[in-house]
Image (cartoon, rainbow, N blue to C red):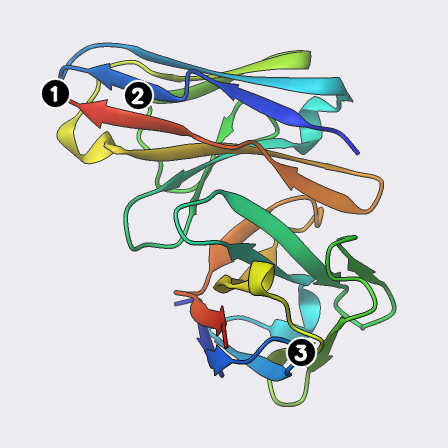
Amino acid sequence: EIVLTQSPGTLSLSPGERATLSCRASQTVSSSYLVWYQQKPGQAPRLLIYGASSRATGIPDRFSGSGSGTDFTLTISRLEPEDSAVYYCQQYGSSSWTFGQGTKVEIK
Amino acid sequence: EVQLVESGGGLVQPGGSLRLSCAASGFTFSNFHMSWVRQAPGKGLEWVSYISSSSSLIYYADSVNGRFTISRDNAKNSLSLQMSSLRDEDTAVYYCARGTATGTNFDYWGQGALVTVSS
């Protein structure tokens, strides 16, 4: 089973700053199968990025994804107060779906 | 508008059983793969089970294999998860999630149903 490790655990930044979130896989992951979700307290996750770099419908362009192989990145270019949330990466492989443990983004 | 509404959560004793349901609307349910994903209190997300659009393919996480059964009724736009031999560690919010066309991720999620396993 592929293990996804996200870092940092928590990111505390001010509005307007740039956030860089990392997702590292224990084995090579197809870029087509790497996605990112945003989850706010008390809410279900929301799909942000699919195929490692494509934004889902309605997602602002300040969110971008990149990476390949075992290293993937979610970047929020200019943080807004509403971006406060936990962000999860997820991959699919061998009839199994696995998630990273999440990165919490706090807005100062 | 796509809607997924879970029901059937509650308190159950260890070793007991519970059945979750998910009512789907706003899309052609029979065309989409579906999954259950859970989240223990204060923890991350864990995929639980998958069922293809025609029920021909079914997969389970190792943690629930042999104890949980996923099923769907395309005529009723409904997804179910029968849970038995429940353990303390099954305590979680269970989300019903729609698979994308590739089936490799989830584009719509329900609001979740809380299952608490405790004596």
Find residue A62 and name its label.
2
Q: CA distance from mark 2 to mark 3?
A: 47 Å
The structure residue drawn at horizontal position 42% and vertical position 16%, both measured from the top left corner, is A8
Q: Check the image and report above or below for A57 versus A52.
A: below
Please tell me whether mark 3 sits on a helix, a strand or a loop: loop
Q: Nearer the viewer, residue B56 or B31?
A: B56
Task: Between residue B31 and residue A27, name the one nearer to us.
Answer: A27
Q: Mark 1 — residue?
A: A108
In this figure, which residue is indicated by the disc labeled 3? B15
Q: Amino acid at mark 1?
A: Lys
Callout 2: SS: loop
Reply above or below: B79 against A83. Answer: below
| Quarter of the figure with residue B66 | bottom right
Q: Does the rendering let one see residue B49?
A: yes
In contact (CB < 8 Å): disc 2 and disc 1: no
List the single residue furthest toward the bottom.
Answer: B76
Tag in front: 2 or 1? 1
